[in-house]
DNA sequence: ATTGATATGGTGTCAAGGGCAACAAATTCA
DNA sequence: TGAATTTGTTGCCCTTGACACCATATCAAT
């Protein structure tokens, strides 16, 4: 599904993108390093970097002092004045960020709501914030586009929000509306899928190309897949709804709901109840559970871990990933006993597929969704750096 | 993970491959059709086709008589004298075929064994057959390479057979051995993965880019995935081991084994027993079950279908395919009551993801694995038609 | 400080590739 | 028979990256 250049000038686009993607993903580096990494000729890299610099996408600065012989090579860095706007509407808040091409969250605003914001409210708030930024502090910046990390079912190709139960949205043409209001090109994606991409490119799964990502939020379990380096969106864009699967439960005594889904059985509310806590935020829950010796809490953690282990083992058998990343409260299940979870998973998965698996907690924290959404917005730029 | 050309002459390879893939997948067609389909210029297509014809990969023949104005366009067809050797070692037989670039199984030999053949035996048998074919009847042919559809865990990149339980092979360097013996470049793949690719390119899933394929054989359940047009092999090449997952079972009364795997619960042996049959071949089983009114057999079919439905619903929630293809005895579960299976699946899957799903029986029959294996062997040719 | 070794940037030339326009050829239709 | 239509063919042009050669900047040894 990757378009390969069929014309000579398509090669130019490809190579400009290759260079830009290098500095975008791996940070500032010398021209010489780019030459090695891309396999292109020195003179070609020189030419490409000049063009990228001319269009303001990268900046060149004096070489770092190395201790090596030979002419020093100037450092190429993605411009900090090229930004993507990233937004994440949640049930009680709207987060808007400006993420630079270098991967830094340069600006961030969080607006809280007492009730879930409507699509129109969200569009208005985003437009207001972005318009404000355009005069200050991002007056010098080029806004490439806008990415939306949305908790719900999204058609990535059209920006249509099919269903976002926690926001109460249904069949909203959100991508179009926000594009009109901000005059930016907009990409809408599922939050978990974009989170997976963020962890894949910048987080815990950086060196892996086959990644299963599962995130446990207050309202359910979502996830994303990167297989053979490709973000899996599904035929309609609805892939990754792990929370709705019906898990295999080894011990019937672990079951709490008749024919329940994964998120009926494994969820944050049950953890809170078992630990005797009211609604708390994630870090408080993590701290409490990490320290807790309450047998009821421990038993519930174990139960949820067992169910999760079967789900992960199934995923390993079918997808053979090299990395599983767990976010949200699922990271707590992992961190409470990483070896136990790994052992449970390996006991139920095919030996060969499970022997090289790594299970990790997500690494990017609160930046994850903004980075993932920005990445989606940057995709067009990376595919055609000077044409966009 | 798709290599995009970074040099001008890489464009040539891409475009030659584009043309060749067109006639390979879609059959003989006029140059004008190729021009439309590839988006390339008339003169470019002309040049590319000439080069392909010169190297013997395609043949041109006089235009079909159409009833349209304008100069008739000559028909370009993949050469029938370009073949890939495809082999499929099974528990009791070895199948070897020669598949043309046009997709036709031109030669086929099946050798039966009383006990599972060793890797060395298989290599010897294949070498003998291929050497024979080289003098007759394939003396005029160019053998592009050899593809192996192997029932077991295979590292696709190295041709190493990690484990093939039914053949009794373990850590066999099969790809290398057969390459030495036949002097062909060899690609080894998992049989179900290659079957999925065959159904994707030539079979029931032709028009789909997101396909879940599940095959029920005498010895277990294997499968393959095509997601966004990409064959999913996994980090080590072990993806698709559906038989080893632990299924979610809605009714505890449907469970036959404590914490059993999918293929413990859903298998051909249980179907045969319920129908009161001894070991029979697939078509006999299909015929018998299609006609059977035996309540025990019907109950068992229903039970297996219920379990399968949950597995498929889970796959839909996570992967959002547009097509599910069932082969082997799983096709029987489907054909006995297609609407029932679809309803069971849709009842357990997310509405949005399941509403556009198609569930079909596999279409290619006994040619499937040979075509899939040949396709793997053709891949290198299609990526670089004249360089190979 | 001077000089040589090494690595890299810069420039001009070259070959390869596809697009394009003009022309030729082959068919249908009036 | 000629006009309209579609497609193959040919020669030229533009774009692109590779390559060779020279310039330049650093380090190390004298």
Image (cartoon, coloured by chain):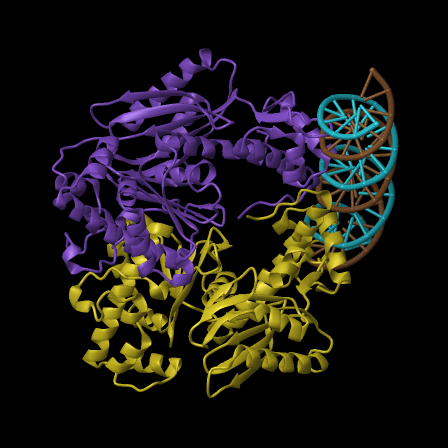
Chain colours: A purple, B yellow, C brown, D cyan
Looking at the image, residue B191 lies above or below residue A134: below
Identify the image quadrant of residue B314: bottom left
- Which of the two residues, B46 or A48, is positioned nearer the viewer here? A48
In the rendered view, does C23 fall on the left or right side of A158? right
Identify the image quadrant of residue B33: bottom right
Identify the image quadrant of residue A49: top right
Q: Is residue A386 visible?
A: no
Looking at the image, residue B168 lies above or below residue B103: below
- Which of the two residues, A187 or B179, is positioned nearer the viewer here? B179
The residue at the point 40 percent across, 54 percent down is: B322
Q: How many marks?
A: 0
The residue at the point 11 percent across, 37 percent down is: A276
The residue at the point 60 percent across, 60 percent down is: B379
Question: Residue A78's x, y, as percent?
Answer: 56, 26
Question: Residue D20's x, y, as percent?
Answer: 86, 38
- Which of the two residues, B286 or A143, is positioned nearer the viewer here? A143
In the rendered view, does B45 fall on the left or right side of B309? right
Q: Is residue B132 visible?
A: yes
Question: Residue A54's x, y, as percent?
Answer: 65, 22
In the rendered view, does A266 fall on the left or right side of A180? left
The residue at the point 20 percent across, 60 percent down is: B250
């Amino acid at each position: 599904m990757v378009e390969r250049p069929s014309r000579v000038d398509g090669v130019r686009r490809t190579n400009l993108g290759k260079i830009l993607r290098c500095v975008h993903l791996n940070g500032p580096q010398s021209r010489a390093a780019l030459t090695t990494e891309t396999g292109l000729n020195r003179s070609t890299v020189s030419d490409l970097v000049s063009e990228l610099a001319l269009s303001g996408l990268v900046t060149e600065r004096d070489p770092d002092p190395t201790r090596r012989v030979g002419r020093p090579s100037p450092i190429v860095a993605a411009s900090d004045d090229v930004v993507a706007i990233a937004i994440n509407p949640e049930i009680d808040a709207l987060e808007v960020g400006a993420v630079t091409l270098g991967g830094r969250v340069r600006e961030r605003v969080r607006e809280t709501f007492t009730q879930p914001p409507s699509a129109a409210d969200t569009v208005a708030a985003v437009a207001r914030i972005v318009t404000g930024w355009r005069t200050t502090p991002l007056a010098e910046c080029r806004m490439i586009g806008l990415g939306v990390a949305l908790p719900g079912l999204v058609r990535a190709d059209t920006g249509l929000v099919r269903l976002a139960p926690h926001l109460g949205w249904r069949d909203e043409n959100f991508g179009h509306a926000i594009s009109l209001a901000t005059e930016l090109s907009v990409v809408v994606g599922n939050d978990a899928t974009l989170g997976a991409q963020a962890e894949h490119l910048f987080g815990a799964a950086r060196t892996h190309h086959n990644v299963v990502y599962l995130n446990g939020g207050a309202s359910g379990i979502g996830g994303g897949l990167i297989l053979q380096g490709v973000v899996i969106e599904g035929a309609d864009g609805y892939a990754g709804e792990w929370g709705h699967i019906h898990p295999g439960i080894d011990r019937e005594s672990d079951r709490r709901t008749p024919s329940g889904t994964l998120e009926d059985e494994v969820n944050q509310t049950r953890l809170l109840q078992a630990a005797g806590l009211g609604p708390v935020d994630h870090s408080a829950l993590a701290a409490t559970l990490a320290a807790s010796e309450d047998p009821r809490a421990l038993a519930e953690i174990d139960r949820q871990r067992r169910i999760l282990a079967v789900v992960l083992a199934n995923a390993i058998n079918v997808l053979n990933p090299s990395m599983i990343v767990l976010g949200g409260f699922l990271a707590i299940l992992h961190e409470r006993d990483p070896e136990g979870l790994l052992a449970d998973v390996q006991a139920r998965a095919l030996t060969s597929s499970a022997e090289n698996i790594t299970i990790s907690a997500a690494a990017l924290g609160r930046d994850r969704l903004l980075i993932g959404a920005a990445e989606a917005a940057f995709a067009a730029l990376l595919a055609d750096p000077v044409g966009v």
